[in-house]
Amino acid sequence: MTDQWPILSTLTFLPLFGALLILVIKDEGEAAKRNIRNVALLTSLFVFVLTLIMWAGFDKNNPGFQWREQIDWLGKGLGYHLGVDGLSVLFVVLAAFLMPFAILASRYSVKERLKEYMVAFLILETTIIGAFCALNALLFYIFFEGSLIPIFLIIGVWGGPHRAAAALKFFLYTLLGSLLMLVGLMAIYWQVGTLDIPVLLSYHFPVTMQIWLWLAFFASFAVKLPMFPVHTWLPDTYVQAPTAGTLMLSGILLKFGGYGFLRFSLPMFPLASAKFAPLIFVLSVIAVIYMSLIALVQKDMKRLIAYSSVAHIGYVTMGIFAANIEAVEGAVFQMLSHGLVAPALFLSVGMLYERMRTGEISAYGGLVNNMPKFAAVFMIFTMANIGLPGTTGFIGEFLTLIGTFREHSWIALFAATGIILSAAYMLYLYRYIIFGSLSRESLKSLLDLSTREKCLLYPLAGLIIFFGIYPAPLLNMLHGSVELLVNNYQQALANSNAIFAK
């Protein structure tokens, strides 16, 4: 690691440089479109390589912030401050890893306004990486809110037939929650005189203020995840968004909510977090069970996977607010796993949609007969979504349930039923579309995975199995920062109890 090379600023703003290169390309003919796609893809690949360099230079034994960059910007406490710790570094890598998949997935499906489409994705990458690297709450808010603009355009311009309504619903839901967080940030600045996150992490807010601030931040992060019952924007958005947009939404944008709980709610407002933890547990269990039951009756593949995502988010929130090392590590691992599995499932469904122009489950059957390679990789993604041992889904759910069981055994017991329900709806989906007879003539002409599609699905399948069998590289990276977070949280609660005891 070096303090001389501003690697985080490079990672954050390099996609904007790629976007500028695309803007100067004259959009005329197939050659220009090919250049636009290549510039976008090469830019995203270069950013990913840089994240691997950052990861390789990260000291996992240091639980604090690394690669820090700090410049005076708007005055006292409102500086340009970047840095990553064990909680954020993996999300930066995940974001950079997924962007080439999003661009490659759109290589042939997007033909209109291609230049604007690729520019929107590169701007989106800047906002995502910037949010995970930000060590100033105002800077985090700017990147956090800035991500709404490109994804809103991606859904609203290049989405399905009802894209305008879905994009507007998504924008209004997330914007309303974020405005409450902005009010909370102003209150923090008036109280502390700074929005520098390392300073805020060591500041002890009054109990009453913690409660109001926790609620303000919760409104934003709960919608972003999304948690039950503020999840209603998600199914329509997933169905109407283009495949690449759904990939980025499910793979990384939803992780803002869980990351926000870990960066702000738990360490800054520990007493309020403990007070509201029972509410979070109830909402999490409802999400796991109720959303799984809704997924069981879905007739559209994208909607089924969307409701499955909300159910799996229940494990994340449950693990975060169980607030012990196993549970928090499990919650973060579950988010990382979901960042691989959900995009893989949506890519698979998108490939079927490109062939048949429908997402209805009943339109398919017997795909194993002429798409055996697709059937094999889709089986891996299905098993990972269920949480089968040997996949990343098992590691996250197992650690989360173990950690929650230590604190609240009944909560863990009820949440564990979600594993059975996820097996029910995912095996139903797999059996229906993969096995059976080729009952429709149109199915008999479907071709198996192309080279491009193999390049999209095979790496995801490989990582899901690799980290499912050998999760140590991720858990070791997380452990120091999670341990510091949990210890500080428990110490804050112990100090509070000692004060009240007196």
Image (cartoon, helix red, strand yellow):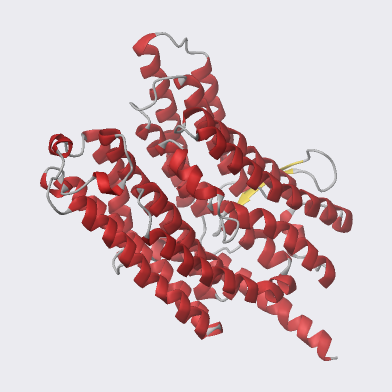
Viewer-proximal residue among 283 and 135: 283
Residue 122 seen in render: no
Viewer-proximal residue among 36 and 409: 409
Viewer-proximal residue among 445 and 226: 445
Indicate the position of residue 117 as horizontal and vertical percent values: 48, 26
Residue 43 seen in render: yes
Q: The C terminus appears in which quarter of the rendering?
A: bottom right
Indicate the position of residue 105 as horizontal and vertical percent values: 36, 34
Horizontal relation, residue 441 to residue 13: left or right: left
Quarter of the image where one finds residue 418: bottom left
Q: Residue furthest bottom?
A: 502
| Residue at x 25%, y 52% (from the top left corner) | 378
Quarter of the image where one finds residue 239: top left
Indicate the position of residue 359 as horizontal and vertical percent values: 33, 42
Note whether 294 is above or below 346 in the view shown.
below
Note whether 411 is above or below 395 in the view shown.
below
| Residue at x 82%, y 38% (from the top left corner) | 74
Viewer-proximal residue among 465 and 388: 388
Note whether 171 is above or below 59 in the view shown.
above
Count the marks. Answer: 0
Indicate the position of residue 250 as horizontal and vertical percent values: 47, 49
| Residue at x 46%, y 62% (from the top left corner) | 291
